[in-house]
Image (cartoon, coloured by chain):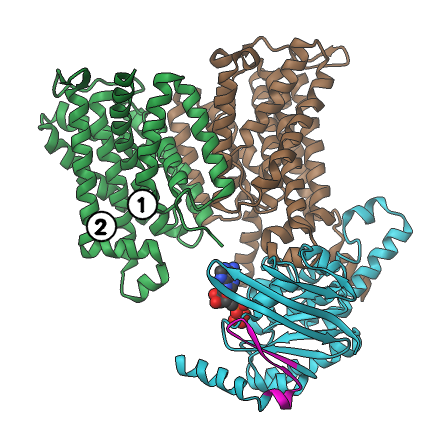
Chain colours: A brown, B green, C cyan
């Protein structure tokens, strides 16, 4: 009896996971096949988008949709850039500091914020992202104002400057793997159970022993730390940041990636980022079409694939099952 | 000094009128359909372009162009309700996310059709009214007058027509309203259409003052958002008070402090209100 | 008298509405006690106050000799006082087994962490947790639905799953809010039998809110009657059944409807 049980409930790396890993590895190696610098750049952008969206996903796992995610990416970016440029600290200090500051801010504001649920939480995070942008603009001495901070030093790991795109790609890929592994562990551990319980029925979760407030706050802190972590890398790769970089539009783009990939799926952020991020890079000449395509995809996915692209295989097997 | 204050108050009332026209549609969409419509500002932009087309390309007189704008906007709103929002009726969050997509689509379609550059609007009237020391440009007075007339007309519609009463009933209580025979398949598109038309006509009215471009929808959306949160999501009287208040606060702080300070103060206020009283400053407290 | 729960002068106001006014009663250890009353009498509110889902306007709740007034629900359940909900009784997207596992988390570590990083002891603890889940599932008769998604279960089964989640937290006192609603008379009888088995096998005290009078009269050792937020009777089933105030409350309620 209990043997059969543990097979069901203890996650094992099954055949489908293996297939996914192989596919992921193949996609990840595309830039090397082409050998083209541009493809490495696209690869980096995909990794960064997938990482930031992973943070958003953790928050979504407890049932909250944040429109302030870009602000936390921005907090990480500014923290690292200021530490590196003003205090001369190395990037390997700036990077964790970015994650830490974003997480600390999330911790401080999380408790009152997360009492709001549903659209009210979305609305307050929308206002907070706007507030972040406005306040940063108000302090040009710190943020560089509307002209931002240019010439941010490149990523440097213990003396090794990542000057080549391919090097940065390897680094961001490694970071993405680490973040995804973290998500996997959370997802399949006790914490993931608690998150899912809070997402599905907060009152019942609380009454069966899960401290819902603390659990939601933890998800918010983890997700925002991942955002800050991503922001630090992003800033040093792109070399320029300004308050406008981390505005409403960036938050919306993370939401689009998450929803398209699958709001509650482990692979959602990755699938969404692989599917959507390359689009603007290849549509350089016609950016306005890109946004229309994004909008159409978003509405279509919401309507026809509420579990996102990552839920597609599940939906297909169910269809097949229904027919046979 | 008192002259400056009076001047600011007049400007504030004009702003407040604009904000209220934006906010009513936004709050109605939430009250009636539980939609938080992030595309609301794009209808302001579309209204400005429609009016511009009417006046500049078709040679219509300004009031006629506004009427055409209103009619087109109601139709457009109805279509949007039917084809974008209707599938998400039971799901507030998905409806709101869909509106983010809709906003992108509308803005960038305008960008493709009209290009990014601001277009000037032929000025309708010139000159100023003088009241003692006070100066009110005739164009602003006209906008204010038209805005007030439109708002009063809408108020009359809500209070004294069958459809208006049905809309208010929906805001009060969906279930009871549908039991009493309010037909949702008509009222939902109508509700969104009317709200969107108010935004569009605001765009048309403001076009002569501020010019027209695909990007002008952002600020009015923010203002509507602020007004609606402060007044209580779904509450029209709340929106009315909050709109005038916001117009006055902005106009006074930007005269005496700075415009960016006003923005920060109002957004901070929004955050505090959401935290302390999600039902709005004047709303009924939620249990 | 060996009481496990003492409710003393509990009151709750929602704005102008007094949902519960100065209600006191005791629940004896090992008993099945019932709370009855017309719709809107304040039964669910009473549960919400006892378990900390809502904070009381005034009054005191003592569980197992210790005051628990004002504790958040997750701490109340940790002390051994679990409850089910009248509606939304399950985690709708998860399987039946996963639903019960989430209740069992309170007493057992279950999940990747322990199986990945823990040693043999951790694995044993986890196996014990799973065994406990199976036991609960069998006890409420949901084993054959173990892998079904909770939201797709029949209404009666969802109610039973709610009981199972509560049971998985291993309570000494279980509060049930209309667990037999929507069942047909035959199912109600079967459910009554299940409850008696649960009480025996899990060493439970039960406090139940129900509208099925036959079930209540048969199961309960003691009944509290609420009407308009006030306690109007309190005693053995026969006494309550013949109480003039109780009869009036129910007749009055029917008149309104
Ligand atoms: N959260 C709440 N906010 C406002 N009123 C409430 C709330 N919960 C319950 N009530 C009111 O309190 C009264 C008692 O409700 P309830 O305890 O659910 O009754 P019962 O469970 O006996 O049917 C009802 O009038 C109900 O409308
Ligand atoms: Mg009840």
Query: Relative to residue C145, is residue C196 depicted above or below?
Result: below
Chain letter for the residue marked with disc 1 in the picture: B
Q: Is residue A296 a member of the stretch shown in magenta?
A: no
Q: Are marks 2 and 1 on the same chain?
A: yes
* Magenta-drawn stretch, dominant element (helix, strand or loop): strand
Task: Looking at the image, tell me whether mark 2 or mark 1 is earlier in sequence order.
Answer: 2
Position of residue A192 measured from the top left corner of the image (x, y, whole percent) = 69, 47
Where is mark 1, residue-wise?
A: B236
Q: What stretch is highlighted in magenta?
A: C223-240
Residue B93 visible (yes or no): yes
Residue situated in front as seen by the camera: A241 or B28: B28
Q: Do the residues labelled 2 and 1 touch (CB within 8 Å)?
A: yes
Q: Residues within 10 Å of mark 1 (few under 14, many from 20)?
A: many
Q: Is residue C232 a member of the stretch shown in magenta?
A: yes
How far is the residue under mark 2 from the one under mark 1? 10 Å
Position of residue A16 measured from the top left corner of the image (x, y, whole percent) = 67, 47
Position of residue C100 measured from the top left corner of the image (x, y, whole percent) = 70, 62
Where is mark 2, residue-wise?
A: B158
Q: Residue at x 83, y 59 (%)?
A: C127
Residue A281 visible (yes or no): no
Quadrant for residue B231, please give it. Answer: top left
Q: Which residue is drawn at 61% across and 74% down?
A: C179
């Amino acid at each position: 009896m209990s043997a059969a049980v543990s097979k069901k409930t203890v996650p094992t790396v099954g055949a489908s996971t293996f297939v996914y890993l192989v596919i992921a590895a193949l996609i990840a190696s595309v830039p090397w096949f082409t050998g083209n610098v541009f493809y490495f750049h696209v690869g980096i952008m995909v990794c960064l988008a997938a990482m930031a969206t992973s943070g958003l996903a953790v928050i979504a796992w407890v049932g909250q949709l944040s429109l302030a995610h870009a602000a936390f990416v921005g907090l990480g970016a500014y923290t690292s850039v200021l530490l590196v440029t003003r205090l001369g600290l190395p990037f390997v200090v700036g990077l964790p500091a970015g994650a830490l500051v974003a997480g600390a801010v999330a911790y401080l504001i999380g408790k009152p914020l997360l009492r709001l649920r549903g659209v009210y939480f979305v609305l307050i995070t929308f206002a907070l992202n706007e507030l972040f942008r406005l306040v940063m603009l108000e302090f040009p001495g710190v943020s560089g104002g509307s002209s931002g901070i240019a010439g941010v030093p490149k990523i440097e790991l213990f003396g090794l400057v990542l000057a080549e795109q391919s090097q940065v790609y390897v680094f961001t890929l490694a970071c993405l793997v680490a973040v995804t592994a973290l998500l996997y562990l959370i997802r399949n551990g006790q914490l993931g159970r608690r998150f899912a319980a809070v997402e599905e029925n907060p009152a019942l979760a609380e009454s069966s022993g899960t401290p819902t407030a603390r659990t939601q706050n933890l998800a918010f802190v983890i997700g925002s730390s991942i955002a800050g972590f991503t922001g630090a890398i992003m800033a040093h790769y792109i070399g320029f940041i300004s308050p406008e970089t981390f505005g409403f539009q960036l938050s919306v783009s993370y939401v689009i990636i998450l929803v398209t990939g699958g709001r509650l799926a482990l692979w959602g952020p990755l699938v969404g980022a692989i599917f959507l991020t390359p689009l603007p890079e290849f549509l350089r000449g016609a950016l306005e079409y890109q946004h229309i395509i994004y909008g159409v995809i978003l509405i279509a996915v919401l309507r026809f694939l509420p579990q996102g692209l990552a839920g597609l295989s599940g939906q297909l097997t169910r269809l097949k099952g229904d027919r046979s | 000094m008192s002259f400056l204050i009076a001047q600011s108050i007049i400007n504030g009332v004009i702003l407040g009128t604009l904000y209220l026209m934006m906010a009513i549609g936004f709050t109605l969409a939430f009250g009636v359909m539980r939609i938080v419509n992030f595309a609301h500002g794009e209808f302001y932009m579309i209204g400005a372009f429609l009016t511009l087309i009417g006046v500049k390309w078709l040679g219509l007189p300004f009031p006629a162009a506004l009427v055409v704008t209103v009619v087109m906007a109601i139709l457009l709103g109805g279509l949007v309700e039917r084809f974008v929002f209707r599938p998400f009726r039971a799901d507030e969050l998905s409806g709101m996310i869909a509106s983010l997509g809709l906003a992108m689509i509308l803005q960038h379609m305008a960008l493709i059709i009209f290009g990014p550059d601001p277009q000037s609007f032929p000025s309708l009237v010139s000159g100023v009214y003088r009241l003692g020391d006070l100066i009110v440009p005739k164009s602003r007075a006209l906008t204010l007058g038209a805005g007030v007339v439109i708002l009063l007309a809408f108020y009359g519609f809500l209070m004294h027509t069958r459809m208006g009463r049905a809309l208010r009933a929906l805001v009060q209580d969906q279930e009871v309203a549908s039991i009493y025979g309010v037909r949702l398949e008509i009222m939902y598109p109508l509700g969104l259409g009317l709200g969107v038309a108010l935004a569009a006509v605001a765009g048309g009215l403001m076009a002569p003052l501020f010019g027209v471009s695909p990007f002008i929808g952002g600020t009015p959306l923010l203002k509507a958002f602020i007004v609606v949160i402060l007044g209580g999501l779904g509450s029209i009287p709340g929106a009315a008070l909050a709109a005038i208040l916001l117009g006055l606060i902005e106009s006074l702080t930007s005269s005496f402090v700075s415009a960016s300070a006003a923005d920060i103060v109002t957004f901070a206020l929004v955050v505090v209100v959401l935290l302390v009283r999600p039902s709005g400053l004047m709303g009924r407290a939620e249990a | 008298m060996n009481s496990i729960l003492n409710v003393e002068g509990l009151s709750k106001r929602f704005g102008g509405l007094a949902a519960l006014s100065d209600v006191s009663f005791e629940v004896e250890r090992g008993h099945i006690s019932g709370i009855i009353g017309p719709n809107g009498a304040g039964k669910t509110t009473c549960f919400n106050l006892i378990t900390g889902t809502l904070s009381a306007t005034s009054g005191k709740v003592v569980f197992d000799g210790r005051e628990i007034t004002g504790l958040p629900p997750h701490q109340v359940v940790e002390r051994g006082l679990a409850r089910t909900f009248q509606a939304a009784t399950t985690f709708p997207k998860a399987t039946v087994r996963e639903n019960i596992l989430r209740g069992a988390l309170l007493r057992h570590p279950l999940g990747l962490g322990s199986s990945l990083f823990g040693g043999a002891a951790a694995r044993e603890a986890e196996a014990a947790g799973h065994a406990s889940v199976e036991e609960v599932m069998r006890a409420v008769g949901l084993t054959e639905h173990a892998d079904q998604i909770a939201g797709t279960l029949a209404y009666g089964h969802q109610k039973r799953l709610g009981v199972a989640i509560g049971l998985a937290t291993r309570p000494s006192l279980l509060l049930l809010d209309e667990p037999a609603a929507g069942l047909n008379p035959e199912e109600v009888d079967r459910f009554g039998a299940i409850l008696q088995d649960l009480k025996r096998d899990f060493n439970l005290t039960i406090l139940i809110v129900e509208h099925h009078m036959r079930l209540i009269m048969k199961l309960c050792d003691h009944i509290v009657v609420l009407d308009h937020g006030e306690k109007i009777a309190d005693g053995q089933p026969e006494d309550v059944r013949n109480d003039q105030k109780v009869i009036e409350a129910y007749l009055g309620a029917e008149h309104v409807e």
